[in-house]
Amino acid sequence: MSEEPIHESEGSRTRQALATYFRRISKALGRGEPVPVDDAGTVTVDPGPEPEFDVELDRSDGTVRLELELEFDDDEGAVDTDAAASKATFELYADSAEKWRWRLRHDNGNIIGDGGEGYTDKRDAVNGIESVQRNAPGAHVVDASRDETLPEDGGSEATFELFRDSADEHRWRLIHDNGNIIADGGQGYASKQKAKQGLNSVKSNAPGAVIEELEGDD
């Protein structure tokens, strides 16, 4: 019987990007949730309770190939090629000062993150969104109040930092390795747990969120 290609992607990735990708798969497997196949999570598989797992390492003509393969019967698992990638949308807009900004709005209407600054060029704002999409899922969370240090096995080029502001409210921000703040919660929370829930929502919803350009916003 011939194979039926469902999804295929190929390209180079950094070690950090690979770590992020495999971490998402690992979490989904551990929770018994559908496993994301693509970065946006629009293609998922549910491999069932006990799929076959093959690991193959070979060398040919100067190239080393490592293959990881899950195999399961159609009636024991499921494939979804139209999965809900995100429950949020990136809103791209120009403010009253004609600066380009973005915010991540959840389907429930709440703004769960924003860029925190305006950009003269719209493309720079889009680049900011794309940086959050790449880095949020695998970013470690560091509690500044506990003087925590960043683990060495990072799967991202950014880190979520939890901190308290001058009003003693809990906040979060996503800091790139270059020192730039690429996202923040835009608000303070009464408890650290609520702040963690906010950043976790960004972690799960940012990668697959579509970008919608608004006519204008003040």
Image (cartoon, grey):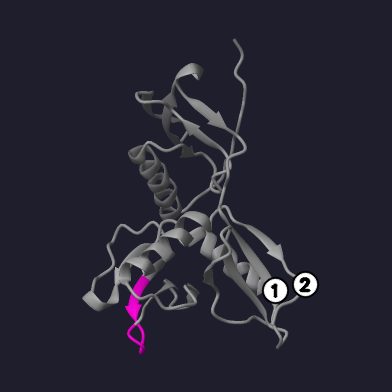
Q: Position of residue 102 (x, y in %)?
A: 62, 72
Q: Residue furthest right?
A: 215
Circle 1 sits on which residue?
93
Distance CA(mark 2)–CA(mark 1): 7 Å
Q: Where's the C terminus, which quadrant?
A: bottom right
Task: Name the quadrant containing residue 164.
Answer: bottom left
Q: Which residue is at 39% across, 62% downward?
A: 197
Which residue is rendered at x = 42% and y = 71% of the image? Answer: 177
Q: What amino acid is found at the position of numbered circle 2 in the picture?
A: Glu
User: Would you say the residues marked 2 and 1 are in contact, meaning their CB atoms lie under 8 Å apart?
Assistant: yes
Which residue is found at the position 31% from the left and 71% from the top? 192
Residue 98 appears left or right of 107? right
Residue nearest the viewer, comparing 82 with 69: 82
**Residue 16 appears in which quarter of the rendering?**
bottom left
Within 10 Å of the Cα at label 1, are there few (<14), some (14-19), or many (20+) other Cα atoms?
many
Side of 136 where 92 appears, left or right = right
The x and y percentages for residue 141 are 33, 65
Q: Residue 167 lies in magenta, yes or no?
A: yes
In-front residue for pair 75/110: 110
**Horizontal and vertical percent for residue 171?**
39, 76
Q: Which numbered circle lies on residue 215?
A: 2
Answer above or below: position of 101 versus 44. Answer: below
Instruction: Give the mark nearest the N terminus, 2 or 1.
Output: 1
Along the horizontal axis of the image, is 133 left or right of 30? right
Instruction: Kindly identify the amino acid type of the residue bearing the numbered disc 1.
Output: Tyr
Category of crowding for the residue at label 2, using alpha-carbon neighbours closer than 10 angstroms: few (below 14), some (14–19), many (at least 20): few
Asked which secondary structure carries label 2, the reply is: loop
Q: Quadrant of the N terminus?
A: top right
Q: Which residues are magenta?
A: 161-168
Q: Does 142 lie within the magenta span? A: no
Q: What element does badge 1 sit on?
A: strand
User: Does residue 50 lie above or below 156 as drawn?
Assistant: above
